[in-house]
Image (cartoon, grey):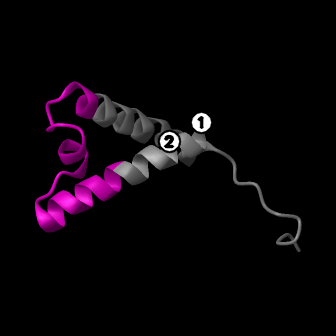
Amino acid sequence: MDALALILIIVGAINWGSIGLFGVNIVGMLFGGQLSVISRIIYTLVGIGGLWAITFFFKEKVLDKEHVR
Protein backbone atom coordinates (compact mmCIF):
# COMPACT_ATOMS: atom_id res chain seq x y z
CA MET A 1 0.00 0.00 0.00
CA ASP A 2 2.89 2.37 0.76
CA ALA A 3 4.37 1.88 -2.72
CA LEU A 4 1.00 2.60 -4.35
CA ALA A 5 0.61 5.75 -2.27
CA LEU A 6 4.07 6.92 -3.33
CA ILE A 7 3.28 6.28 -7.01
CA LEU A 8 0.09 8.33 -6.69
CA ILE A 9 1.92 11.13 -4.92
CA ILE A 10 4.55 11.20 -7.67
CA VAL A 11 1.81 11.38 -10.33
CA GLY A 12 0.23 14.28 -8.45
CA ALA A 13 3.54 16.07 -8.01
CA ILE A 14 4.41 15.76 -11.68
CA ASN A 15 0.95 17.01 -12.65
CA TRP A 16 1.13 20.00 -10.28
CA GLY A 17 4.66 20.77 -11.44
CA SER A 18 3.55 20.82 -15.06
CA ILE A 19 0.64 23.10 -14.16
CA GLY A 20 2.94 25.47 -12.26
CA LEU A 21 5.73 25.55 -14.82
CA PHE A 22 3.91 25.22 -18.12
CA GLY A 23 0.20 25.71 -17.41
CA VAL A 24 -0.46 22.15 -18.65
CA ASN A 25 -2.68 19.76 -16.73
CA ILE A 26 -1.30 16.39 -17.87
CA VAL A 27 -3.99 14.28 -16.18
CA GLY A 28 -6.75 16.44 -17.61
CA MET A 29 -5.14 16.45 -21.04
CA LEU A 30 -4.75 12.65 -21.12
CA PHE A 31 -8.19 11.79 -19.77
CA GLY A 32 -10.58 14.30 -21.34
CA GLY A 33 -10.39 17.42 -19.20
CA GLN A 34 -10.14 18.05 -15.51
CA LEU A 35 -13.86 17.51 -14.94
CA SER A 36 -14.10 14.17 -16.75
CA VAL A 37 -15.00 11.19 -14.58
CA ILE A 38 -11.66 9.44 -15.15
CA SER A 39 -9.66 12.58 -14.28
CA ARG A 40 -11.71 13.10 -11.13
CA ILE A 41 -11.11 9.49 -10.11
CA ILE A 42 -7.36 9.96 -10.60
CA TYR A 43 -7.39 13.21 -8.61
CA THR A 44 -9.31 11.44 -5.84
CA LEU A 45 -6.83 8.55 -5.77
CA VAL A 46 -3.91 11.01 -5.63
CA GLY A 47 -5.61 12.75 -2.70
CA ILE A 48 -6.14 9.44 -0.88
CA GLY A 49 -2.49 8.57 -1.55
CA GLY A 50 -1.48 11.86 0.03
CA LEU A 51 -3.61 11.19 3.08
CA TRP A 52 -2.11 7.70 3.38
CA ALA A 53 1.38 9.22 3.21
CA ILE A 54 0.66 11.12 6.44
CA THR A 55 1.07 7.76 8.19
CA PHE A 56 4.71 7.68 7.03
CA PHE A 57 5.52 10.26 9.72
CA PHE A 58 4.35 7.90 12.45
CA LYS A 59 6.15 4.74 11.35
CA GLU A 60 9.30 3.58 13.06
CA LYS A 61 12.43 3.73 10.97
CA VAL A 62 14.11 0.38 10.37
CA LEU A 63 17.87 0.46 10.00
CA ASP A 64 19.88 -1.99 7.94
CA LYS A 65 22.17 -4.19 9.99
CA GLU A 66 25.05 -2.86 7.88
CA HIS A 67 24.35 0.71 8.97
CA VAL A 68 24.07 -0.08 12.69
CA ARG A 69 27.40 0.22 14.51
Residue 39 falls inside the magenta stretch? yes
Viewer-proximal residue among 46 and 34 = 34
Answer with the quarter of the image where residue 44 lies.
top left
Q: Residue at x 36, y 39 (%)?
A: 46
Quadrant (top left/top right/bottom left/bottom right) for the C terminus: bottom right
Q: What range is drawn magenta here?
A: 12-40
Answer with the quarter of the image where residue 55 lies.
top right
- Residue with the mark numbered 2: 5
Q: Is residue 6 left or right of residue 38?
A: right
Q: Is residue 58 left or right of residue 41?
A: right
Viewer-proximal residue among 21 and 47 = 21
- Tell me which amino acid carries mark 2: Ala
Answer with the quarter of the image where residue 45 lies.
top left
Residue 21 x/y as whole percent:
16, 68
Residue 2 x/y as whole percent:
58, 42
- Rendered image: mark on residue 1: 1
Q: Is residue 46 left or right of residue 68?
A: left
